[in-house]
């Protein structure tokens, strides 16, 4: 469990929180807005521990009191974390696809306990992960609690899409911005966690400023797969055929889906496969985007832009549930035609 002062790379957010605490002006409702995996949940936990500590000093929890002990053990009765895993737990119909944080989750997990007395006396903290998954009905139901919770209460909504929250929610909360982390910082943190330099460099690059994503992807074999993809794209860019690409995407996305099912056996295989495909499409797009800046040949620049467009099309088709093999065949053809000299001569 970390102290606020241990959070790295988020100086603006932490400064704001420290000042609000010092002035005793911490609002009931906070929105931690920023990319996935940059420290929002860790900060919420550190702040929650401090908020509930019976003997805090200089913005640090004490680590000795009853509250700190149960917090460190991970079972504080007044520290409530609402995750999307609770969707299925509260789903009486068994039909939930696990997408919306509906009122059936938010009422028993947040609204009702927020209206009750704290178990240990110091107050209550609620952290909603992926708060943008709350549907409008659930968000509306939360408004009154945000305005006047019973007793000393802190509600922290975590999101990478603050605009998906209703204006009425945002206006009753203080938005605290979390930034993407600097690549060098992510790299050095990854090395501290045992990755070698080349692994850390690749992971930091693909995860675009998210330590959490970099670690997850490293553990799930995504980084190695992404390196393979980049090798293939380099070959295609130099005029090699793209015939292997559709099979590669299928294999990589299947492997990704398997890993997700290991964490959550009830997750949908199809959804996880699509998520994997989307992830590798993003990395492919990143590959060509990175290569726009350093290119002076206008024709080559145009070819790379066309490649990005082809990937965007594939992403849109994926969202629209178009047949997957078809999407990747079309993508392979578009990329190959775009970069192969023979193909462009024919045209
Ligand atoms: Zn304490």
Image (cartoon, rainbow, N blue to C red):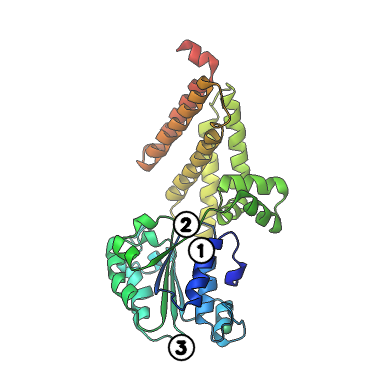
* Residue 295 appears anywhere in the view: yes
Check whether the beta carbons of the residues at disc 2 and disc 1 lie within 8 A of each other.
yes
Name the secondary structure under disc 2.
Answer: loop
Where in the figure is residue 232, as x and y percent of width and height? 59, 31
Q: Is residue 62 left or right of residue 320?
A: right
Whichever of callouts 1 and 3 sits on the residue coming sooner in the sequence is 1
Q: Vertically, is 14 above or below 287?
A: below
Q: Vertically, is 112 above or below 251?
A: below
Whichever of callouts 3 and 2 sits on the residue coming sooner in the sequence is 2
Q: Nearer the viewer, mark 3 or mark 2?
A: 2
User: Which quarter is ligand 1 in?
Assistant: bottom right
The residue sitting at 60% across, 45% down in the picture is 205
Q: Which residue is mark 2?
A: 34
Where in the figure is residue 111, as x and y percent of width and height? 34, 75
Where in the figure is residue 116, as x and y percent of width and height? 36, 84
Q: Which residue is mark 3?
A: 121
Q: Residues within 10 Å of mark 3 (few under 14, many from 20)?
A: few
Name the secondary structure under disc 1.
Answer: helix
Which of the two residues, 163 or 20, is positioned nearer the viewer here?
A: 20
Which of the two residues, 284 or 331, is positioned nearer the viewer here?
A: 284
Give the quadrant of residue 138. bottom left
Name the secondary structure under disc 3.
Answer: loop
Q: Which residue is mark 1?
A: 13
Q: Vertically, is 135 above or below 220?
A: below
Q: Residues under labels 1 and 3: Cα distance?
A: 28 Å
Disc assigned to residue 106: none
């Amino acid at each position: 469990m970390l102290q606020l002062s241990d959070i790295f790379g988020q100086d603006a957010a932490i400064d704001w929180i420290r000042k609000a605490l010092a002035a005793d002006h911490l609002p009931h409702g906070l929105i931690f807005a920023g990319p996935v995996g940059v420290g929002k949940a860790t900060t919420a936990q550190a702040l929650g521990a401090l908020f509930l500590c019976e003997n805090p000093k200089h913005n640090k929890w004490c680590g000795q009191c009853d509250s700190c002990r149960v917090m460190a053990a991970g079972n504080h009765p007044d520290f409530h974390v609402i995750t999307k895993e609770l969707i299925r737990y509260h789903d009486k119909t068994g039909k939930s696809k696990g997408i919306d944080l509906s009122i059936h989750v938010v009422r028993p997990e947040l609204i009702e306990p927020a209206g009750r007395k704290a178990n240990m006396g110091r107050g209550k903290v609620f952290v909603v992960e992926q708060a943008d998954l709350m549907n409008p009905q659930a968000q509306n139901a939360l408004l009154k609690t945000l305005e006047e919770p019973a007793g000393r209460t802190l509600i922290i909504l975590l999101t990478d899409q603050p605009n998906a929250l209703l204006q009425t929610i945002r206006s009753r909360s203080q938005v605290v911005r979390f930034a993407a982390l600097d690549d060098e910082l992510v790299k050095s943190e990854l090395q501290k966690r045992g990755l070698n330099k080349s692994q850390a460099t690749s992971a930091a690059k693909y995860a675009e400023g998210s330590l959490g994503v970099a670690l997850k992807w490293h553990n799930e074999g995504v980084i190695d797969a992404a390196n393979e993809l980049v090798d293939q794209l380099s070959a295609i860019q130099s005029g090699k055929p793209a015939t292997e690409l559709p099979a590669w995407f299928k294999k990589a996305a299947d492997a990704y889906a398997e890993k997700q099912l290991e964490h959550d056996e009830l997750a949908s295989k199809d959804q996880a496969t699509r998520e994997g495909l989307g992830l590798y499409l993003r990395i492919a797009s990143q590959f060509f985007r990175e290569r726009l800046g350093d290119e002076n040949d206008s024709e080559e620049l145009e070819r790379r832009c066309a490649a990005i467009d082809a990937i965007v099309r594939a992403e849109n088709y994926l969202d629209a549930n178009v047949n997957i093999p078809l999407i990747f065949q079309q993508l392979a053809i578009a990329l190959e035609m775009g970069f192969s000299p023979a193909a462009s001569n024919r045209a």
